Image (cartoon, rainbow, N blue to C red):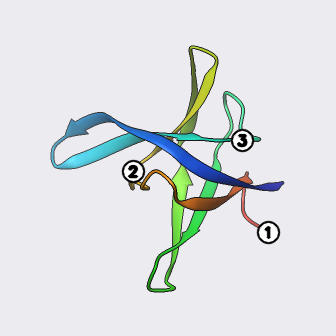
């Protein structure tokens, strides 16, 4: 299952031993608690960026996607729940 969305907000969730984890909020999502998958974006250079979604957190009625690579607010993404097809 795939869908299009835009990054609305990003928060640093944790930082440990030089590794960071982020929470990304999208304007819409098909991810639900327990889901994993991928967010794909295209950089200004044209390079494709694939960001694994490690999990999903529901907070205050919003669905935050846990990732290890930050995406800037305003970035269009394609989300894939499960493995991308």
Which residue position holds label 3?
29
Identify the residue shown where x is 78% and y is 55%. 3
**First reached walking from the N terminus: tag 2 or tag 1:** 2
Side (left or right) of 61 relative to 10: right
Q: Quadrant of the N terminus?
A: bottom right
**First reached walking from the N terminus: tag 1 or tag 3:** 3
Mark 3: few/some/many CA within 10 Å (<14, 14-19, 20+)? many
Quarter-of-image position of residue 38:
bottom right
Placement of 79 over or under 20, stated as above or below: below
Identify the residue shown where x is 20% and y is 38%. 16
Name the residue nearer the viewer: 4 or 52.
4
Could you tell me if the residues under marks 2 and 3 are in contact, i.e. CB atoms within 8 Å? no
- Judged from this view, the residue extending furthest toward the right is 1
Which residue position holds label 2?
68
Please, what secondary structure does the residue beneath circle 1 have? loop
- Judged from this view, the residue extending furthest toward the top is 60
Identify the residue shown where x is 56% and y is 37%. 55
Please, what secondary structure does the residue beneath circle 3 have? loop
Which residue position holds label 1?
85
Side (left or right) of 30 relative to 60: right
Placement of 52 over or under 58, stated as above or below: below
Quarter-of-image position of residue 42:
bottom right
- Of circles 2 and 3, the one toward us is 3
> Label 2 vs label 1: CA separation?
22 Å
């Amino acid at each position: 299952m795939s869908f299009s969305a835009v990054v609305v907000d990003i928060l640093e969730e944790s930082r440990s031993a030089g590794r960071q984890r982020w929470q990304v909020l999208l304007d819409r999502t098909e991810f639900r608690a327990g889901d994993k998958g991928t967010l794909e974006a295209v950089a200004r250079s044209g390079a494709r960026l694939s960001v694994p979604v490690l999990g999903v957190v529901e907070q205050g009625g919003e669905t935050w996607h846990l990732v290890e690579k930050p995406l800037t607010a305003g970035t269009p993404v394609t989300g894939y729940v499960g493995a991308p097809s």
